Amino acid sequence: MAQLKHVQIYNSERFQHDYISSIINGKKTMDIRFLNRKSAPFSTLVSGDLVYLKESSKKIKAEFIAFDVTKIILEHSSQVEYLLKKYKTPLDITNSDEMSLIIKSYQSSKYAVIFKMQAVKKVEGIYYNSKGNRSSWITIK
């Protein structure tokens, strides 16, 4: 199967944390995307895929290769808190207020995609127009 490309969109204002800088600087080495349905990245991301990172309404800032991709069906809301606390260091969750806000935001999620990041590179000048698509994850076919 050919490598897929994805655009992962962050909104640093939502959690008051610049996660893209944390990824570029090597502090954030893993991510968990919580979802309410089996949409991207749950339905599309596999190890070896290329992922571009951007802030909402901005240019792409970085890219990485996803690996160790794990997909989980969440059977209880407590699993969100468990996963976030278990992986808080590689997720670069730095304080209890941030942790509480993330838990509250995703406690009703039904699915989770956990993945690690390798070959992270800062990139400049790439613009991806996601106008009209309010999703935080887009798979490019």
Image: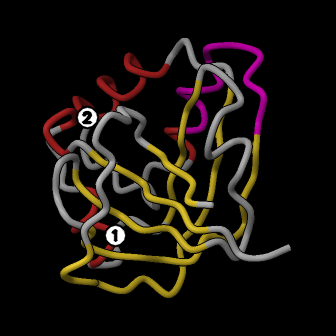
Residue 45 picture quarter? bottom right
Indicate whether 138 appears above or below 62: above
- Report the span colored magenta: 72-83
Q: Quadrant of the C terminus?
A: bottom right
Residue 58 picture quarter? bottom left
Gap in angstroms between the C-alphas marked 1 and 2: 17 Å
Q: Residue at x 27, y 57 (%)?
A: 19
| Residue ID for mark 1 | 23
Indicate whether 60 appears above or below 70: below
| Magenta span includes 75 | yes
Q: Residue at x 55, y 59 (%)?
A: 140
* SS category of the residue bearing label 2: helix
Q: Residue at x 53, y 27 (%)?
A: 81
Mark 1 or 2, nearer chain start: 1
How far across and down, in percent of the image, does residue 71 sit? 76, 44
* SS category of the residue bearing label 1: helix
Q: Position of 112 compared to 28: left or right?
A: right
| Residue ID for mark 2 | 98
The amino acid type, in three-letter code, at marker 1 is Ile
